Amino acid sequence: MTSSEITGTAQHAAWQARELPPVEEVRPGLWSIPVPIPHNPLRYVSVHAFALEGGGLGLVDCGWEHEAGWTALTDGLTGIGAGIADVRGVLITHLHFDHLGLAGRVREASGAWIAMHPADGDVVRQMSGRDGAAAVATQVGFLVGLGADRETAVSDVGDPARWESFHRMATPDRDLLDGDVADFPGWSLRAVHTPGHTAGHLCFDEERTGVFLSGDHVLPRISPNISTNPGGEADPLRDYLAALAAVGQRPEPAEVLPAHEWRFTGLTARTDALRAHHEGRLAELLTAVREHPGSTPWDLAGHLTWSRPWSSYERGMRVFAVTETDAHLRLLASRGAVVGTAGPVPRFTAA
């Protein structure tokens, strides 16, 4: 098994310098265009632009909807001798705002179609036009159900106005299922369904060049957030680990093009490392349950190791940490390692 190695050296150098990386032609007719994400440690999403046979461009992901992001995307396209009007189609790896946010604006400016997996497309349709206050109430109720006190949950979820933009994202024109080949003439871009980060997450295997666009499913440095959500999948971490194992069994691609951080090789080695990371996390959580029996997911999150002191976590960071802890608890429960009490707020003990 080969190890995982950095190939996106300019991307990596820019990351270390805390700068936006350059636009790069990573294969003839295939470019990566960094689009910044405001106030986010991920910093940017790599939009991948494909020159299509017969003219025009296809995009994989679009970036976060804000003016700096739009400027970065349009300037990036100008730098490769194209423009927004040249976009014919947009493939979305998953529904998160840093991937789907600008898609509606791209479609409005170009007439391009938007395609994504129906498991995510249906969620976007359900969210479309939803009132921000209703979304906040749902999120607050979900966190209270994980053990938060209501006042803290309200503070962490934030103002309803903050949620409005998430409910104005573009709904897809086309569904894309596992194994489908995208309508990008001149390329053989096959969809690979990899649920976990979201229920409809897609990677794309470009069979002509051997590159693998991994979205957020496999990143070179960090593990993507795997969380529970109101009305979401019952056991998202089980789904994610199964998808990781399946991707790790595929023939090694020539290069992996993730949506964040930098390009790399050694997909199998990286999927093995991510699976090992989660098994270690599950073991740590099981120890916490044994040491603090009868604890809620909210309580147990505070007994785990994080990248910074737990006391400094608040708002979105704390929400992601708690819902990620809940995802790990659900997998432990499905494995029979822990038992949760019935009732509005589960409390866990070791089996």
Image (cartoon, helix red, strand yellow):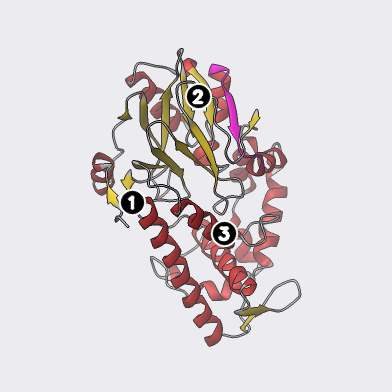
Rounded to the nearest whole Å, what is the CA distance between mark 3 and mark 2? 32 Å
Label 1 or label 3, whichever lies nearer to me, is: 1
Count of numbered circles in the view: 3
**In the image, is residue 140 part of the stretch drawn in magenta?**
no
Looking at the picture, which amino acid does disc 2 mark?
Answer: Phe
Q: Is residue 27 above or below residue 39?
A: above
Instruction: Kindly identify which residue carries mark 1.
Output: 266
| Residue 35 horizontal side relative to residue 200, left or right | left
> What residue is shown at x 55% (from left), y 75% (from top)?
300
Rounded to the nearest whole Å, what is the CA distance between mark 1 and mark 2? 26 Å
Looking at the picture, which amino acid does disc 1 mark?
Answer: Gly
Instruction: Kindly identify which residue carries mark 2.
Output: 184
Looking at the picture, which amino acid does disc 3 mark?
Answer: Ser
- Disc number placed over residue 227 in the picture, else none: 3
Q: Is residue 327 above or below residue 51?
A: below
| Residue 189 horizontal side relative to residue 331, left or right | left
Q: Is residue 37 visible?
A: no
- Marks 1 and 3, the one that precedes in the sequence: 3
